[in-house]
Image: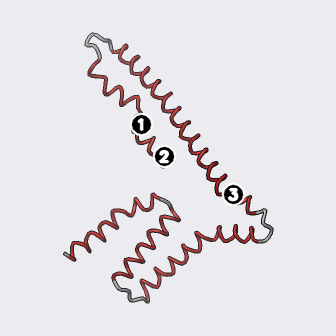
Amino acid sequence: MFLDAIGSIFGEGGLGSTIVNMVKDYFPPDMSEAEKAKFTMAINEAAHIKEKEMMQLAMQADRELTDRIASLEGTAADLNQLPFVGRIIIFLRGCQRPLWGFATLYMDFLWFTAWKLTEKQQTALIVINVLVLGFLFGERTIKNLEPLLLNIFGNSSKGAR
């Protein structure tokens, strides 16, 4: 997430291109093409160095956050200290994604084949699907499904008016 935000700041062509495009109009009229190219290269070089520093800082911040979470919540290695119960917890923790995924898949199968659901129940099942898909596949899934969901819910809310 954070790295995506940093990437969007620098955009296509990088920060250097953005700066060069902003200051192009302020180049002196008597400046030669070679001087303009040299100046552009200097700006791009400085921007590249800053981009590299920002990425290193972002990676360091991400590492520190991961370390902090591990120190506060513990790790799977900590659970191994509990002889029998620890292994069961690790197993159950590993089963979360497949369990929820298959349960949702089964509910969807029943929804399309056997169940006769009310509109509220269908809405609840859609919410469950979005939550499970978001959990299993991440934020990108939600973003990719957003236009479809807006279309579905937008049309139903317009029809109700």
**Residue closest to the eye, 58 or 37:** 58
Q: Is residue 133 above or below residue 62?
A: below
Q: Residue at x 36, y 62 (%)?
A: 146
In 3D space, how far apart are the residues under numbered discs 2 and 3 (Cα atoms)?
23 Å
Q: Earlier in the sequence, mark 3 or mark 1?
A: 1
Quadrant placement of the C terminus: bottom left
Choose the circle earlier in sequence order: 1 or 2. Answer: 2
Between disc 1 and disc 2, the foreground one is: 2
Which of the 4 image quadrants contains residue 150? bottom left
Residue 10 shows which numbered tag? 1
Task: Name the colouring of the figure.
Answer: secondary structure
Q: Is residue 24 above or below residue 98?
A: above
Q: What percent of the width, then of the height, locates residue 153?
A: 30, 71
* Residue under the point 53% across and 40% down: 58
- Disc 3 marks a residue whose amino acid type is Thr
* Numbered disc 1: secondary structure: helix
Q: Few, some or many C-alpha atoms within 10 Å of disc 1 (few <14, some 14-19, many ≥20)?
A: some
Q: Residues within 10 Å of mark 2 (few under 14, many from 20)?
A: few
Q: Which residue is mark 3?
A: 75
* SS at mark 2 in the image: helix
Tag 2: amino acid: Phe
What residue type is disc 1 on?
A: Phe
Tag 1–tag 2 contact (CB < 8 Å)? no
Tell me the residue that label 2 is attached to. Answer: 2
Q: Residue at x 33, y 15 (%)?
A: 33
Q: CA distance from mark 3 to mark 1?
A: 35 Å
Residue 66 versus residue 97 in the image, above or below: above
